[in-house]
């Protein structure tokens, strides 16, 4: 038993080391492009900035540290497949074949949904928000957004949308393990619809556009989860 525990610790250390190596490789590869990455992330705002408006740095060191911070986060995100793979390899020996298949499916589906959530936020939500703000702000106000606060704002939105896009997985797991029945979810459909707007009001920024643009996909993702659960239940007989 003691030897097995030691072997598990050695294997865990190996996997964590490979996770760290994967992250460092990506970070060092992206480091030279830190400012380019920030310009890309800032594009939804800068393309809708009114004339004479600009991004500013209110802290002397933020012009250096903010792009680096974004690069670190980008490296963590891009190395996520390797991180999850190493975790899967570590856990796989303790799982049955059916459990391995379920875990692998959930991981792959989760990564896809995470990417879709972030891209939906970047390509749809952010342009709508900034276009509205740029067109309807008071004429005497000049928009000068701090680069650090802008980064925090969009990272929070990315996190919210990325996590909310995991809704189908939550629904699938709840029904797969018989915690909630599909029939019960269908009965509660109208309440869940209202609940998505409440969740959006809590998680999204305090503007109606962000909340609506989160609530509607959240409900649609609930329906996707219910549909996939039905298909899986049908296949299982």
Image (spheres, rainbow, N blue to C red):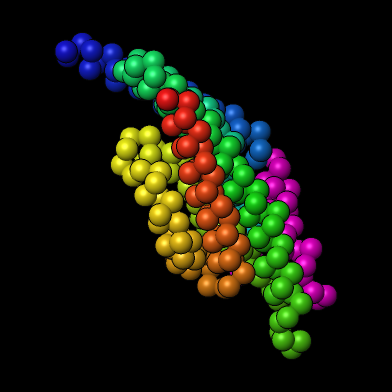
> Picture coordinates of residue 215 (x, y %)?
54, 61
Q: How many marks?
A: 0
Image-based side of 135 in relation to 89, left or right? right
> Picture coordinates of residue 18 (x, y %)?
48, 23
- Seen as rendered, the residue at the extreme bottom is 140
Name the one closer to the observer, 52 or 167: 167
| Bounds of the magenta segment | 32-58
Q: Is residue 36 visible?
A: yes
Instruction: Please check the rendered image and state whether residue 40 is part of the magenta-colored stretch, yes or no.
Output: yes
Q: Is residue 91 above or below residue 164?
A: above
Q: Is residue 76 above or below residue 61?
A: above
Image-based side of 72 in relation to 12, left or right? right
Quadrant in which the C terminus appears: top left
In the image, what residue occupies the spot 43% across and 39% down? 172
In the image, what residue occupies the spot 79% across and 74% down? 50
- Seen as rendered, the residue at the extreme left is 1
Name the one closer to the observer, 210 or 27: 210
Quadrant in which residue 100 is drawn: top left
> Picture coordinates of residue 214 (x, y %)?
56, 60
Quadrant in which residue 134 is drawn: bottom right
In the image, what residue occupies the spot 39% across and 46% down? 183
Name the one closer to the observer, 224 or 123: 224
Q: Is residue 164 above or below residue 23?
A: below
């Amino acid at each position: 038993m003691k030897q097995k525990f030691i072997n598990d610790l050695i294997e865990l250390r190996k996997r964590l080391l490979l996770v760290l190596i994967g992250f460092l490789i990506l970070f060092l590869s992206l480091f030279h492009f830190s400012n380019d990455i920030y310009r890309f992330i800032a594009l939804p705002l800068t393309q809708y900035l009114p004339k004479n408006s600009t991004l500013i740095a209110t802290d002397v060191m933020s012009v250096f540290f903010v792009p680096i911070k974004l690069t670190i986060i980008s490296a963590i995100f891009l190395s996520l497949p390797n991180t999850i793979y190493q975790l899967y390899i570590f856990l796989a020996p303790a799982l049955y074949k059916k459990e391995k298949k379920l875990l692998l499916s959930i991981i792959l589906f989760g990564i896809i949904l995470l990417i879709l959530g972030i891209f939906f936020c970047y390509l749809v939500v952010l342009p709508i928000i900034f276009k509205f703000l740029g067109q309807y702000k008071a004429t005497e106000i000049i928009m000068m957004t701090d680069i650090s606060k802008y980064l925090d704002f969009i990272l929070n939105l990315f996190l919210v949308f990325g996590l909310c896009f995991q809704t189908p997985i939550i629904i699938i797991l709840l029904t797969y393990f018989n915690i909630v029945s599909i029939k019960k979810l269908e009965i509660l459909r109208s309440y869940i619809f209202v609940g998505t707007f409440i969740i959006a009001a809590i998680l999204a920024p305090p503007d109606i556009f962000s909340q609506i643009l989160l609530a509607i996909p959240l409900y649609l993702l609930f329906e996707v989860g219910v549909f996939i659960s039905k298909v899986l239940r049908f296949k299982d007989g």
